Structure formats: C-alpha cells, structure tokens
Amino acid sequence: MAGFTRVGGPVFAGSDKEDRVNAGFVLTGKGVLVVDSLVTREDGLALLEAARSAAAGAGDGAKPAVVAVTALVYTHEHSDHTIGSTDFPPCGVLASEGTTRGLRVELERMAADFAGRGIAPKTPTLVFETRVRLPWDPEVVVAELGGHAEGSSVVYVPSAKVLFTGDLVFRGRAAWVGGIRPERWLAALRVLESWEVDVVVPGHGPVGGREILAEQRAWLECFLARAKELRTEGVPARQATAILGDEFGFTERQRENLFFGLRRRLGLRHDEEGDSSG
C-alpha cells in the first residue's frame, strides 16, 4: 500500500516506502489533519508532501484549498508511528492522555538513540481524556479505547465511514503484543464493530472493509486462548514464545516482544521459575 490514495471522501491512506506502517490524512475546511507520521524522517516528509499535494488540488476555483497541515493525531505512542513527525511544521499535536504518558516514557527510553540520529518526534500540545470531536468539515472523531498500548486511539470520519485504527488492527501479520491489555483490546474491537464503517485503515497491513475488525478480534481471541492453555499447562514463557511464534506467524523480530508480553501481561512464568524439588 506504499504511496497515498483516496480511501473515501476527503480521506487518504498509505504507508512507508517499505510498506511496514500505515498513516493518512484528512482534507478539512480547517486544513490538513494528519493521522500518525510513519517510521523515519524520510517517510514523514513524503507523507507531508502527499498531504500538501492532495490539498493543493482540492480547491474548486471559487474556494481555494487550505493546504496547511493544521494538526497531527497520534493513534498511540510507539515510535514507528511518531518518528516521522520530526520535520513537520509547527502544528497542533493531538493525543490522548494515555498516549501522552506513553510517549513521554518512549522518548526517555529512546533518548540517546534518537539524539544520535537527529530524531525529535513532536510532543502533544492538545491532550484529551477519552474522546474529542473536531467539527472541521468533515467532522472527525478521535477516541481512546486502549488495548494494544496504554493510549490506543482511533480516528473516525463519520461522513466517509473511514476508520483509522492504529495498532488495534494488524492485517496479514501477527500483532505486536508486548504491551497488550487483553480485555481492553477485545472490548475496543467489539465497540468498533458496532460503528458505521465501510473502510478500515489498520496500523499495519492492507486497507480493508469492516470485516477486518472481526478478523482481528478472532485472531486475538484465538491467540489469548492458546496462551492461557499454555500457562495452565505450566509451559515457561520462552518455550511458549517458540510455540506461539510458530503457530501464529510471529517473525523472529517480533518474538522478543512476544516473550515480553507473555511474561509481563499474560502471566506465563519465566523459564527458571517453577518447582525446585529434588
């Protein structure tokens, strides 16, 4: 899905040049609203250029297009969705309280690495608690649901029936589960399945219809049930990582994150824990 294309009304979506992470933008009467900023500075600049180009062509002659980037929304705090904002022009940065807290931790953790590469993701300037409505023609709704990350949020354009889910939805690949909050994630997906949505832009993977919300929920339910089964059997986390990695298609790069989630979030014991009898 590399490049940016119209997915409904004034809403565009696309991915970085390696097709790893998704982002998008909405052309509104107040300017361009960007959703996430991709994984590198180069990708962020390409996203900006696509947004400005689309906005410049949106005027109708009598009413010039507003080409400025007015605001950036973060769906959550993970760096693959925020690094690209480094070279963004001054604009409002909208994020939930949970995302703002998580981003603070992320920036502290990555400070040395980011400084060495000249990376400085924009920090939130407009922080909301659970939900905010932007009456910008078209109306845009941003809501925190949690689940994948502390502040996992979605961006919804009701008139176009387009939903950006951030990493609440992975399509065609295993989800990152290191910071998983299982019940909140499942509850979030059930809520989203009740909304009037025709187009879903996942955090990773191809754009699809509303059916991919149910597909992600089914994947997550199956994964959690299998993890619970392994925990009940007393399988240690490292062994469970190998089993689940093979069964659910986690890449080698994802497996350390999977191990972390099994230990910290899903209660599987460390390999050295357990009975010491004998």
Image (cartoon, helix red, strand yellow):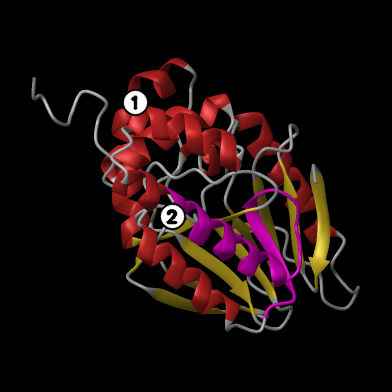
Residue 17 position in % (x across, y down): 75, 33
| Lateral position of residue 51 relative to residue 90, left or right | right
State yes or no: residue 224 in magenta: yes
Q: Residue at x 60, y 73 (%)?
A: 156
**Picture residue at 37% right of the left edge, 66% below the top:** 184
Is residue 71 in sight in this rendering?
Answer: no
The residue singled out by tag 2 in the image is: 224
Question: Please, what is the three-letter code of the amino acid marked with disc 2?
Answer: Leu
Q: Is 220 in front, or is 32?
A: 220
Q: Which residues are magenta?
A: 197-226
Q: CA distance from mark 2 to mark 1?
A: 33 Å
141 left or right of 211?
Answer: left
Three-letter code for the amino acid on which mark 1 is drawn: Ala
The label on residue 111 is 1
Note whether residue 160 is visible. yes
| Camera-nearest residue between 122 and 66 | 122
Where is residue 36 drawn, in percent x and y? 57, 51
